[in-house]
Image: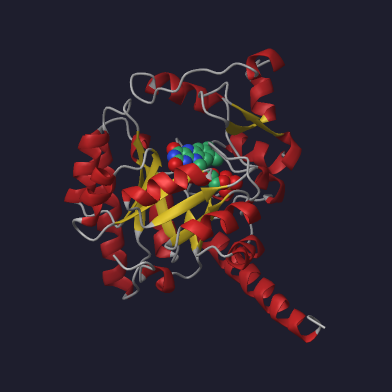
Amino acid sequence: MANKPAFIKELSLPAIAAPMFLISGPQLVIECCKNGIVGTFPALNQRTSEGFEEWLVEIKTELEKFEKETGKKPAPFGVNLIVHATNPRLEADVKLCVKHKVPIIITSLGAVSTVVDAIHSYGGIVFHDIIKKRHAEKAAEAGVDGLILVAAGAGGHAGTINPMTLVAEIKKIFHKNIILSGCISTGRDIASAMQMGADLAYMGTRFINTEESKASPEYRKMIIEAGASDVVYTASISGVHANFLGASLKAAGITEEDLKKDTKIDFGKELDTEAKAWKTIWSAGQGSALIDNNPPVSELVTSLKNEFKKAIQEQIKLLDTYPK
Ligand SMILES: Cc1cc2nc3c(=O)[nH]c(=O)nc-3n(C[C@H](O)[C@H](O)[C@H](O)COP(=O)(O)O)c2cc1C
């Protein structure tokens, strides 16, 4: 596996639409890939491995059809696997990823060499989520191809470290692909991630507010109305610290006292409870502050590209002024 996979240079933007529980499905993934950015979804968004396989077949069939009809190569797609002892589906889902040669696997919680080896066996790529250096070291030992650095303010299970520090600190010890996650909502943000030294930008919350996401209109509206300080960081919903929209906590009757509780993580038999929690209490990152519309993915990618280009051009112009 080359350190920098060839697909990165073939994307229309250096971006991945991040996997989101209850939000990302085939429609979102297919539209992202058709528009030249990586589309992903969590395997657990389907309740069974059989359902997961149906989605894999649907995505592959649609993307093959797109390539045949247009002659354009779609971006590769990815699947998020929760690598934790309490995920009873892990083995079956890994087998399906191998069977269908899923191009990119995103592992969360655990980075284990058996999963990495299984994915490498057919030329697949493994990126792993981390929030701190210790996790990065463990994942590097397991042989992952890239690290997703989940910085402060991100949607879902976010970290607490500033992105500038996190990228610089991890780049000292890890020399493969660096993917930056957390509050990346605009093309300028993507350009900033590249400036910091990332190879790819990882965008979650921005894609909740797209026509193809599975989010309800009320959820999207709450994101549009939220500012950065309306996002609450708490471990009380899923046992791991995550960011949620304060207004959805309030609507669910969650009190300040409740927010101080730490519940225990269990993605297996507790899956239904976890799903129920995330269905009523909506996760989003601080990047909500910059989201004010619900475009189709094609339109969003076009504006991200324009903003990205403009930001880089402005940066280049700075060279006429600085350094002195
Ligand atoms: C509603 C929601 C659900 C998420 N679910 C998952 C998930 O199932 N697996 C995962 O690896 N990350 C999940 N994430 C985290 C995202 O993959 C990504 O790291 C994060 O959204 C990036 O930060 P941003 O939202 O500020 O762009 C979720 C994020 C959100 C907002």
Q: Residue 280: name its quadrant.
A: top right
Q: Residue 185: name its quadrant.
A: bottom right
The vertical placement of 217 against 193, above or below, is above
Q: Tell me the quarter of the image containing the N terminus.
A: bottom left
Look at 79% across and 80% down and name the residue there.
322
The vertical placement of 164 against 152, above or below, is below
Residue 312, x across and y down, in percent? 65, 75
Residue 297, x across and y down, in percent? 51, 57
Residue 142, x across and y down, in percent? 32, 48
One can see residue 302 in this view: yes
Taking 208 as reference, is 153 left or right?
Answer: right
Q: Tell me the quarter of the image containing the C terminus.
A: bottom right
Residue 271, x across and y down, in percent? 38, 23
Taking 149 as reference, is 125 left or right?
Answer: left
Seen from the viewer's position, the closer of residues 168 and 43 is 168
The image's colour scheme reads: secondary structure
One can see residue 23 in this view: no
Q: Residue furthest bottom?
A: 320
The vertical placement of 53 against 143, above or below, is above
